[in-house]
Amino acid sequence: MPNAERELRAAQNQLMFRSVNERIKELGEKVLNAVSELDFACECDNPECHSPITMTIEQFDAIDRMDNRFMVLRGHEDLDVEDVVAEDDGYLIVAKRGAGAELVKELS
């Protein structure tokens, strides 16, 4: 499969997980205060992944405010289509590159 096609598919999967996480945050804000922790979905490019990443709403917001940044569990990064840009306790923050980065920019 051409690299651009793989980059696009990976970005689409990660954008889907981001949408799920934004809904988790929205629901969490209605019942919890901002310092409470929630289980957010790993935003890796594997559509079969259902692994949680536990963090506060504030931590999620900090990642969500950045352009082209996704949180994935350590070991779920896909170095063929993304770069690790930061590490936190138990998870990584990755940025799409190539066609995937363009798609994320276009849809953000």
Image (tube, helix red, strand yellow):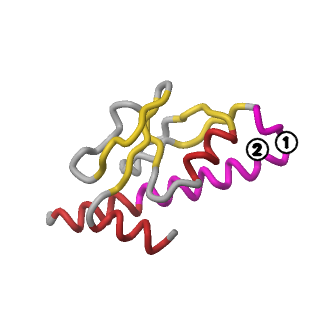
Q: Secondary structure at mark 2?
A: helix
Q: Is residue 65 magenta?
A: no
Residue behind mark 2: 28
Give amino acid for label 1.
Answer: Val
Q: Residue at x 50, y 25 (%)?
A: 89
Q: Are marks 1 and 2 in contact (CB under 8 Å)?
A: yes
Magenta-drawn stretch, dominant element (helix, strand or loop): helix
Crowding around mark 1 (Cα neighbors within 10 Å: few <14, some 14 to 19, many 20+) is few
In the rendered image, the vertical position of residue 36 relative to residue 62, given as above or below = above
Front residue (pair 45, 87): 87
Q: Is residue 29 magenta?
A: yes
Q: Residue at x 69, y 41 (%)?
A: 57
Front residue (pair 38, 49): 38
Query: Outermost residue toward the left?
Result: 2
Q: Is residue 98 left or right of residue 22?
A: left
Q: Which mark is residue 31?
A: 1
Q: State the extent of the magenta-drawn residues as a range.
A: 13-35
Query: Outermost residue toward the bottom?
Result: 106
Give amino acid for label 2.
Answer: Gly
Crowding around mark 2 (Cα neighbors within 10 Å: few <14, some 14 to 19, many 20+) is some
Q: Is residue 8 left or right of residue 20?
A: left
Q: Secondary structure at mark 1?
A: helix
